[in-house]
C-alpha cells in the first residue's frame, strides 16, 4: 500500500482567509523544516518506499512551503500537480 501525503491547507468548514497560515495549526511553524521533510520523502520514494506522491508533486509542495501565496490557488483546487 502506498501513502499519499496531502498538501497543507486550511481546515474545511473554516471561513476563507488569505492569511489562514498565520492562525492555523495546520501550517508548519518552520516551513523550511517541512521543505526538508518533503525532500526526505523524495529520497525514500527513490529508495522504493511506498510513497504515492510523485516527485513533481512533492516538489510542488516544497514550493508551496517556500512561497505559500503563490501556490495557494493550486492547492485549493486540489491540482494533481500538488496532491
Image (spheres, rainbow, N blue to C red):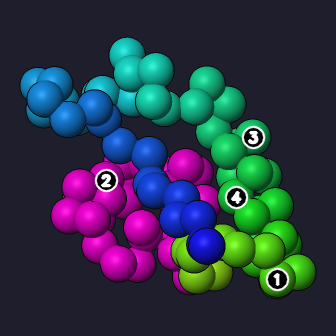
Q: Which residue is mark 4?
A: 38
Per the image, is 4 magenta?
A: no
Magenta region:
56-83
Which residue is under mark 2?
72
Establish if 2 lies above or below 39. below
State left or right for residue 44 relative to residue 56: right
Q: Could you tell me residue 3's position as x and y percent? A: 59, 65
Q: Which residue is mark 1?
A: 48
Q: Is residue 77 left or right of residue 8?
A: left
Which residue does the numbered mark 3 point to in the structure image? 33
User: Does 48 appear above or below 69?
Assistant: below
Quadrant including the N terminus: bottom right
Residue 18 tag number: none
Q: Quadrant of residue 2?
A: bottom right
Contact? badges 2 and 4 (CB < 8 Å):
no
* Circle nearer the N terminus (3, 2): 3
Cα distance between the residues tagged 1 and 2: 30 Å
CA gap between label 3 and label 1 equals 23 Å
**Crowd tier of the residue under label 4, counting other residues whose Cα lies within 10 Å: few below 14, some 14–19, many 20 or above:** many
Mark 1 near mark 4, Cβ–Cβ under 8 Å? no
Q: Could you tell whether 49 is left or right of 58 in the image?
A: right
* Residue 49 visible in the shown view: yes
Name above or below for residue 55 compared with residue 14.
below
Q: Main secondary structure of the magenta part?
A: helix
Expressed as whole percent of the image width and height from the top left, the position of residue 60 reads: 52, 69
Q: CA distance from mark 3 to mark 2?
A: 19 Å
In this rendering, the label closer to the viewer, 1 or 4:
1
Q: Residue at x 61, y 25 (%)?
A: 29
Amino acid at each position: 500500500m502506498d501513502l499519499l501525503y496531502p498538501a497543507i491547507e486550511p481546515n474545511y468548514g473554516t471561513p476563507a482567509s488569505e492569511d489562514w497560515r498565520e492562525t492555523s495549526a495546520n501550517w508548519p511553524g518552520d516551513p523550511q523544516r517541512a521543505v526538508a521533510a518533503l525532500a526526505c520523502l523524495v529520497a525514500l520514494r527513490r529508495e522504493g518506499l511506498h510513497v504515492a506522491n510523485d516527485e513533481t508533486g512533492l516538489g510542488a509542495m516544497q514550493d508551496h512551503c517556500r512561497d505559500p501565496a503563490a501556490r495557494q490557488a493550486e492547492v485549493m483546487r486540489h491540482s494533481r500537480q500538488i496532491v
